[in-house]
Every structure is written in structure tokens, then in C-alpha cells.
């Protein structure tokens, strides 16, 4: 599982960093040197794959892959609430300083990009960690 986690985390970080760079170049999110959001993307990519590896390691019985697939898909669908609420203006951009409106013009871009990052991290997890769960 450790090797699967490393591959999954590396894949998620690489894809998500590339997507964030592209989104910053077209103006959906702040430029790389302008904010700390870029570091958050790297941290979240690694953290999500670590959490998936911990949970997946509990699925050890034969036939667990079907249960894992259903549960991980449900988690992905529930995870969309956060970026969609952020994009719609129902969540503050910074949970540490809710009154900060510095990046309000990027709110929609954040929602779109974060939603895509959830999908790419899910795909990386399924590609490596999900295959470690017994079929």
C-alpha cells in the first residue's frame, strides 16, 4: 500500500499542479506567486491520497473492491459540495479570515478548478490505491 500511496500522491500532485498552473495562466485563479493557494493544492493532493490509503488499507476481505468503489465514489460526489458552495459565494475563500475579500473575483474559478482537482485526485487514487483493495 505504501508504494501505491507514493505513486498516487505523485500523480495527483503532478496533475493538480499542472492544472493549477494552467488555470493561473488563463486567469481563473491567482498567479502562483500571488497567494498561498498553490501550496494548499499540493498539501491537499498529498493529504487526500494519504487518507485514501489509510481507509483502503482497512478493506482486506475478498470482494472488498466493489465496496471500496462505491464508497470512494460517494465520497467524491459529497466532496463537490465544498467547491460548488465556494464558487456560488456560500463559503468564505479563506476559512482562516472569512472577512477577507481579496480574491473574490476568482471565486468562480476556484470552484471550477477545485472541482476538477477533486476528480483528478480521485482518478489517481483509483488508479493506484484502489487496485490494492482485494477484488
Image (tube, rainbow, N blue to C red):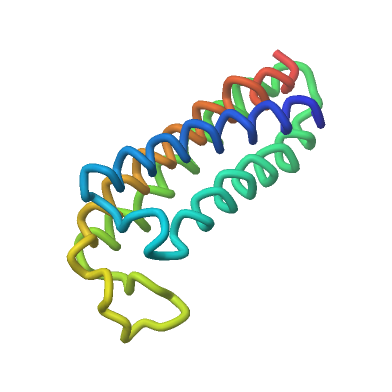
Residue drawn at point x = 64 percent, y = 24 percent: 130
Q: Farthest residue to the front: give it.
A: 33
Q: Nearer the viewer, residue 119 or 19?
A: 19
- State whether residue 105 is above or below residue 58: below
Residue drawn at point x = 73 percent, y = 26 percent: 4
On-image quarter of the C terminus = top right
Q: Nearer the viewer, residue 89 or 99?
A: 99
Residue drawn at point x = 23 percent, y = 50 percent: 28
Viewed as shown, does residue 50 lie left or right of 78? right
Q: Quadrant of residue 105?
A: bottom left
- State whether residue 30 is above or below residue 25: below
Viewed as shown, does residue 69 lie left or right of 102? right
Residue 60 percent across, percent down from the top left: 81, 27
Viewed as shown, does residue 17 lie left or right of 60? left
Residue 13 percent across, percent down from the top left: 56, 38
Q: Nearer the viewer, residue 74 or 99?
A: 99
Residue 58 percent across, percent down from the top left: 78, 37
Residue drawn at point x = 73 percent, y = 32 percent: 6
Q: Farthest residue to the bottom: give it.
A: 99
The tally of labels here is 0
Amino acid at each position: 500500500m505504501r508504494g501505491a500511496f507514493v505513486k498516487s500522491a505523485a500523480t495527483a500532485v503532478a496533475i493538480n499542479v499542472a492544472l493549477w498552473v494552467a488555470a493561473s495562466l488563463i486567469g481563473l485563479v491567482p498567479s502562483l506567486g500571488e497567494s498561498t493557494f498553490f501550496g494548499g493544492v499540493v498539501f491537499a493532493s498529498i493529504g487526500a491520497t494519504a487518507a485514501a490509503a489509510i481507509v483502503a488499507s482497512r478493506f482486506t476481505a475478498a470482494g472488498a473492491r466493489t465496496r471500496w468503489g462505491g464508497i470512494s465514489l460517494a465520497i467524491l460526489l459529497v466532496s463537490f459540495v465544498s467547491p460548488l458552495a465556494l464558487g456560488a459565494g456560500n463559503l468564505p475563500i479563506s476559512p482562516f479570515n472569512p472577512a477577507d475579500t481579496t480574491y473574490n473575483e476568482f471565486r468562480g474559478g476556484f470552484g471550477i478548478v477545485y472541482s476538477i482537482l477533486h476528480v483528478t485526485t480521485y482518478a489517481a487514487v483509483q488508479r493506484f490505491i484502489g487496485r490494492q483493495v482485494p477484488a
